[in-house]
Image: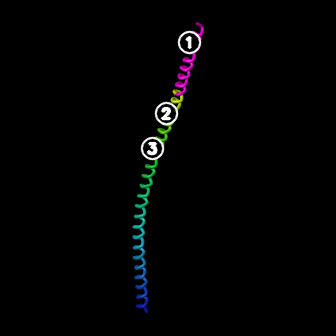
């Protein structure tokens, strides 16, 4: 009977050792998985930071482009106004020449008809 108990105790000890060994193996595997996930997390954080820096640079570049486009639009607007002014002055000069020619012709006719 004592041998039977001794044998049962050995079996229990063997089973406990097997469970402990399997548990240790699972803990080692879980630690390896955890370390791999930490590395992946770190890599993803670096990628996110790089993308944020890239977005910030793109935003700055876009602001610069918008500013330059706004300046160019103002220059174009001013050039259009200048062109309109040149056209008005040109038409005014032409009208003035025409008036001067008519006035000169009228004065010449008056002079000729007086005689």
Q: Secondary structure beneath disc 2?
A: helix
Q: Looking at the image, which is closer to me, 71 or 57?
A: 71
Which residue lies most toward the top here? 115
Q: Nearer the viewer, mark 2 or mark 1?
A: 1
Instruction: Say which element carries label 1.
Output: helix
In the image, is residue 59 above or below residue 87? below
Tags 2 and 1 in contact by the CB under 8 Å rule? no
Q: In front of the other: label 3 or label 2?
A: 2
Establish if 62 lies above or below 97: below
Which of the two labelled residues, at mark 3 and mark 2, occupies the earlier sequence position? 3
Residue at point 45% right, 50% down?
Answer: 52
- Looking at the picture, does residue 70 appear above or below residue 115? below
Is 23 within the magenta? no
Q: Earlier in the sequence, mark 3 or mark 1?
A: 3
Q: Label 3 belongs to which residue?
A: 61
> Quick one: 82 or 68, which is closer to the camera?
82
Q: CA distance from mark 3 to mark 2?
A: 21 Å
Label 3 residue SS? helix
Q: Position of residue 61 (x, y in %)?
A: 45, 43
Query: In the rendered structure, which segment of residues is drawn in magenta?
Result: 87-115
Q: Which mark is residue 108?
A: 1
The quadrant of the rendering that contains the C terminus is: top right
- Label drawn at residue 75: 2
């Amino acid at each position: 009977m004592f041998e039977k108990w001794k044998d049962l105790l050995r079996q229990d000890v063997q089973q406990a050792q097997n469970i402990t060994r399997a548990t240790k193996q699972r803990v080692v595997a879980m630690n390896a998985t955890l370390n791999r996930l930490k590395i992946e997390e770190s890599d993803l954080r670096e990628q996110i930071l790089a993308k944020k820096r890239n977005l910030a640079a793109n935003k700055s570049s876009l602001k610069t482009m918008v500013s330059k486009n706004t300046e160019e639009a103002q220059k174009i607007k001013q050039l259009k106004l200048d062109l309109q002014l040149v056209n008005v002055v040109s038409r005014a000069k032409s009208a003035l020449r025409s008036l001067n020619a008519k006035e000169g012709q009228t004065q010449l006719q008056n002079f000729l008809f007086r005689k």
